[in-house]
Image: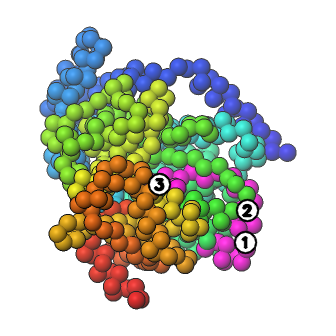
Amino acid sequence: MAILGSLLKRGIRLTNVVQRRKKLNPFRAQKKTLLKLIEKARYTEFGQQYKFDEVLREGHFGSERAFYEAYKRNVPVYDYNSLFGAWWHRSLAGEKNITWPGRVNYFALSSGTSEAASKYIPVTKAMSKAIQKTSIRQILTLGKYQHLPASLYEKGYLMLGGSTKLNAREGHFEGDLSGITAGKIPFWFQRFYKPGPEIAQERDWGVKLDEITEQAADWDIGYVVGVPAWIQLLMEKIIAHYKVKTIHDIWPNLEVFCHGGVSFEPYKQGFEKLLAHPITYIETYLASEGFIAYQTHPQAEGMQLVLNNGIFHEFVPFNETNFSSDGVMVDNPETLMIDEVEEGKEYALLLSTCAGTWRYLIGDTIRFTSVRKAEIVITGRTKFFLSLCGEHLSVDNMNKAVELSAREMSVDVREFTVAGINHDPLFAHHWYIGTDGNVDADQLRNRIDAHLSELNDDYATERKHALKNVFLTVLPTHTFYNWMEARGKMGGQHKFPRVLKKGQIAEWQAFIEKYVEP
C-alpha cells in the first residue's frame, strides 16, 4: 500500500478545502501585490525616478483606485527593447539596485519565437522563490482530481527542460529558465525529480534525449512536464528504442502530463496514440518572466492567473487603437486592472514582477473564460497574428482550424506555420503543415479555410475580397525540427513560430528548397 502517497494525498485534499474557503477577490489581491512590489523597489533607481513613494501614499491613504491611477501616471509602458535599453543592460553589467534591490545573479535567455537575438530576462532570488511557491500550489491542485491514485504522489516527476549547467559570464549566470529553476529544486523534491542532476546538465539536446531514453526503463514516472512537441518526440524515441507499443509499456504509472508553451490541441490526437490509456492533462503558463497562471481544477476552461505571488497584471485591449497592424503597442495604450476586464475579449498582458519588470509587454495575448475566477486562455502573440487585409486571424483561430481539420481527416499534424504573402494584385496565405502520414493537401487546405471562415467573420469577409487564395504545403515533421536546430533553438522552451513574419518567410522558403527533397 502506498502509505506515503496516501498521507500526501490526504494532506493535499485538506489544503484544498482550506483554500476553497478563502473567497477570491482579484482586485484586492492585485492591489496588495503591487503595493508589496512598489514597497520593495521604492529605493531602486527605477523606483526613485518614477516616484514609487507617491504610488505607495495613494495606496495607503488615497481612494480605492488612486494607487493604480498614480502608477499609470508615473510609470511608462515598456517592451523588451525599451526596458533593456534603459535599465536592464545595467543589471546585466553587474550594477546593483537598478529595477530591483540588490544585484541580479541569473538571467534567463529567451528569444521567444519571433526574435533572432537572445533576450536577457532577469531572474532574481525573489522570482525564483515565487516560481517555486506557485509550482507547489500547482502540485497541490492534484488533490482536486479525485480519480488520481494515491500512489502517484510517490512516483517520479520527469521535467524536460534546458541545461542546469549555466553559462558564467561577467559576474552572472545565464541559461534557459527551466535550467535555472531545475538547478534550484528543493531538497525534499530531489528524490522524485528526473532525469536527475547529471542528465539535467547536458547542453546537447540530442544527447540529453538519448540519455533519458537509455535510463527510461529504470524510472517509475507518474508525472511528465514539458513542451508538447518535445515530450511527444521523447516518447516516440523511447517506444522505438524498447520496441514497445506505447509509453505505458515503459511507464505503466504515468498519469499526468503538465504542458505549456503552446496550445496542446494540435498535438493531442497524435500524442494519445502513444498511450495505452487516458491520462490527465494540466495546462500551465510559465514564461521567462514568471509563473503567470495554471489550471486549478479538472473542469476549468482556462488557467487561473497568479494574483498574490509577485506578479501584478495589466490588460491592454488588443485592438487597432492600442496596436499597429504589425502588433506594435502605441506609446500610451489603454490599460485595465483585473476588475475592469470582460469575458470573451482579447487582451495583451503587461507584467510588473519581483524580478524588476515594470509595466512590461510580455507579448502574449489572452482571453478571459471567467472573470470571477480570473481564468484565462492564451490566444496568441501580439506579433503572431495575420492581418494583411483585415482578416485578424489569431493563433487561437489557427490552432482550432488545424485541430478540427486534422481530426476530420484522421491526420496527425505535428507542427504548422503560416505566412501572409503578396498575391498580385492582392494577398494570400501560405500554410506549411508538418505530418509524417499521407494527406491530401488540397482537401486539408479547403477544410482549414472553411473552418477559419466559420471561426472568424473578418476572415470570411476578406476571403471574398482581398484575400484571394490559400496555399498549403505538406512537409515531413523533421523539417520543422531541422529548421530550429539550424537556428540553435532545439529543446527546452523553444517553439516553432506559428506565423512567419517578413524576413523569416524568405529564410524558411530557402531552407525548404535546400533541404527538402522535391
Residue 165, quarter of the rendered image: bottom left
User: Which residue type carries mark 3?
Assistant: Lys
Q: Quadrant of the N terminus?
A: top right
In which quadrant of the rendered image does the C terminus lie? bottom left
- Relative image position of residue 27 (x, y in whole percent): 38, 22
For the residues carrying marks 3 and 2, which lies nearer the camera in this image? 3
Question: Is tag 3's residue or tag 2's residue first in the polypeptide sequence?
Answer: 2
Mark 2 Cα shell of 10 Å, populated few (<14), some (14-19), many (≥20): few
Q: Are marks 1 and 2 in contact (CB under 8 Å)?
A: yes
Label 3 close to label 2 by CB (< 8 Å): no
Label 3 Cα neighbours within 10 Å, binned few <14 / some 14-19 / many ≥20 = some
Describe the element under mark 3 as helix, strand or loop: helix
Residue at 56% in and 67% down = 409
Magenta residues?
237-265
> In this rendering, is residue 202 above or below 148?
below
**Spot occupied by residue 241 in the image (x, y as percentages of width and height):** 66, 77
Determine if residue 245 is in view: yes
Foreground of the two, 47 or 446: 446
Asked if residue 162 shows in the view, the reply is: no
Horizontally, residue 485 falls left or right of residue 458, namely right
- Residue 62, image x and y in percent? 25, 11
Q: Is residue 212 above or below residue 315?
A: below
Cα–Cα span, label 1 and label 3: 29 Å
Q: CA distance from mark 1 to mark 2?
A: 8 Å
Give the mark toward the camera: 1 or 3.
Answer: 3
Q: Read off the residue under disc 1.
A: 245
Which amino acid type is shown beneath numbered disc 2? Ala
Q: Which residue is mark 3?
A: 400
Is residue 243 on the magenta stretch? yes
